[in-house]
Amino acid sequence: QVQLVESGGGSVQAGGSLTLACAITYMNGRYCMGWFRQTLGKEREAIAITYTGEGNTYYADSVKGRFTISHDAAERTLYLQMNSLKPEDTAMYYCAADPAPYGGNYLCVRKKVQSEYSAWGQGTQVTVSS
């Protein structure tokens, strides 16, 4: 069973940068992987999605141009580079994974709902102060 462990969260001032990492174990084959975030009282929101092979990526409008998702197969790690952070980026950030369907290089970007992912990390908190 896939196991995911996030790291890299913390506190930063607005305009700063952070890089989140998601260490992956027991993953075989191709997967859809994503970063979600959640604040108190709100649903978990997909902000970046990728395919562990070569394929398309998805970014929520709120982070497009500021965040970059990447997967390093050799390091077995999913990253989220976050630049130009804003106070509204404050949230708990989660890494998620689910086996990719045939055509995952095109279809993974459609998996934007929490229930579509079978594996989750424990989350890492990001706090951005103004």
Image (spheres, grey):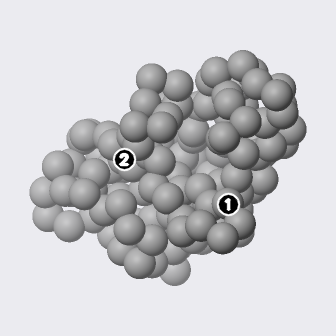
Please state if 44 lies on the left or on the right of 57 as rendered: right
Amino acid type, label 1:
Thr
Please state if 85 lies on the left or on the right of 103 as rendered: right
Amino acid type, label 2:
Thr
Q: Residue furthest left?
A: 103
Q: Which residue is mark 1?
A: 39
Q: Earlier in the sequence, mark 1 or mark 2?
A: 1
Question: Which labelled disc corresponds to residue 108?
Answer: none
> For the point 80% across and 43% down, which residue is it?
127
Quadrant housing the C terminus: top right
Please state if 8 lies on the left or on the right of 86 as rendered: right
Residue 69 pos. (x, y %):
48, 37
Q: Quadrant of residue 25?
A: bottom right
Mark nearer the viewer, 1 or 2: 1
| Foreground pick, 48 / 28 | 48
Query: Would you say residue 70 is visible in this rendering?
Result: no
The span from disc 1 to disc 2 (Cα, nearest Å) is 22 Å
Q: Quadrant of residue 28?
A: bottom left
Q: Which residue is mark 2?
A: 50
> For the point 54% across and 65% down, which residue is it?
44
Residue 111 pos. (x, y %):
31, 62
Q: Which SS class for mark 2?
A: strand
**Neighbours of disc 2 within 10 Å: few (<14), some (14-19), many (20+):** many
> For the point 59% across and 31% down, which residue is it?
81
Residue 76 pos. (x, y %):
55, 50
> For the point 71% across and 66% down, which residue is it?
40
